[in-house]
Amino acid sequence: AQAEAESERSRMLRAMDLAVSFFETQLTGSEGVAARAYLESRGLSQETAARFRLGYAPSRFNALIEHFNEQHIPLSVAERIGLVGRNERGNYDFFRDRVMLPVLDRQRRPVGFSSRLMDPDAKERKYVNSPDTPLFHKKEQLYGLHAALDGIRRSDTAVLVEGNFDVMSLHDVGITNAVAPMGTALTAEQVQILGRVARKVVVIFDGDTAGERASRRALPIFL
């Protein structure tokens, strides 16, 4: 039973990595023009985009499904890791027409995604994360930890910011010990992860009302 579970996990990790590679390729292709322009507007260097394995999910409802079919990835696996949904009309790509921000674990393996809508006037949510899956539990993840571990170990300090793009912007200018919670309030699980890798945490949340409220909520968790 254990061997079977490990084999299933390996299949899910492989499917997740194939998805990341697919989205990376789409970002550099003809369908990724608007996504590349959006990333440029955020001031990110190509080096940082590559380090964080940024990509683009095409607007077509089955672009990733077609890729998985070509790679002989069962849709049941894709559904389990939150990349494919199902409704009365059949299967569809969970992420569409979004900049894709993979969440990598400490071994640099992709386990989930955050995604950013580019159209500021769209009525959909700006950010959508992967649902909880056997690989991904949002409350236990810190965005950018894979890239920040070396910087945290060198300085014994982690910099905690609010957003994914805040993390990448800081890494872009050499502050390579920055991480962020996954778009939700800071959790005890995330603080425990930080406590295992850093002796000091510097919290820099936004200066608006929401950021001040998040800072006040975070303090008791650290204490």
Image (tube, rainbow, N blue to C red):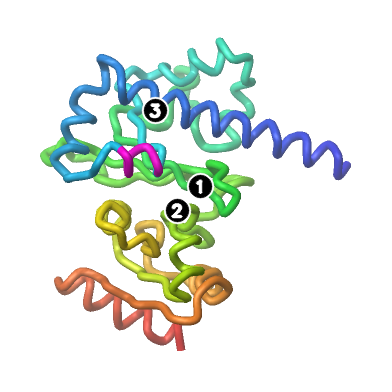
Q: What residue is disc 2 on?
A: 147
Please identify, in this view, whether the residue under mark 3 or under mark 2 is nearer the observer.
2
Q: Secondary structure at mark 2?
A: helix
Q: Which residue is mark 1?
A: 104
Q: Give how far apart the Cα atoms at labels 3 and 1 are.
A: 14 Å
> Which one is nearer the viewer's eye here, 114 or 175?
175
In space, the residues marked 3 and 2 are separated at their CA atoms by: 17 Å
Q: Which residue is mark 3?
A: 24
Question: Which residue appears farthest toward the bottom when viewing the image?
Answer: 223
Q: Are marks 3 and 1 in contact (CB under 8 Å)?
A: no
Q: Which quadrant of the rendered structure holds the N terminus?
A: top right
Q: Is residue 212 left or right of residue 73?
A: left
Vertical position of residue 171 compared to residue 197: above or below? above
Amino acid type at circle 2 is: Ala
Residue at position x 52%, y 37% in the image = 82
Q: Residue at x 70, y 39 (%)?
A: 9
Dominant secondary structure of the residues highlighted in magenta in the image: helix
Q: Which mark is residue 87?
A: none
Q: Where does residue 101 sit, x and y in percent of width and height?
A: 38, 42
Task: Report the magenta residues as a range.
Answer: 47-51
The question of residue 48 being in magenta is answered with yes
Give the percent coordinates (x, y) of residue 179.
39, 62
Dot 3 or dot 1, earlier in sequence = 3
**Above-or-below relation of 196 to 86:** below
Q: Looking at the image, which residue is at 30% across and 33% down?
A: 98
Disc 1 + disc 2, Cβ < 8 Å: yes
Please identify the residue farthest to the left as the structure is shown.
121
Measure the alpha-carbon separation of dots 1 and 2: 9 Å
Image location (x, y in percent) of residue 132: 53, 49
Question: On the image, which quarter does residue 44 sit in?
Answer: top left
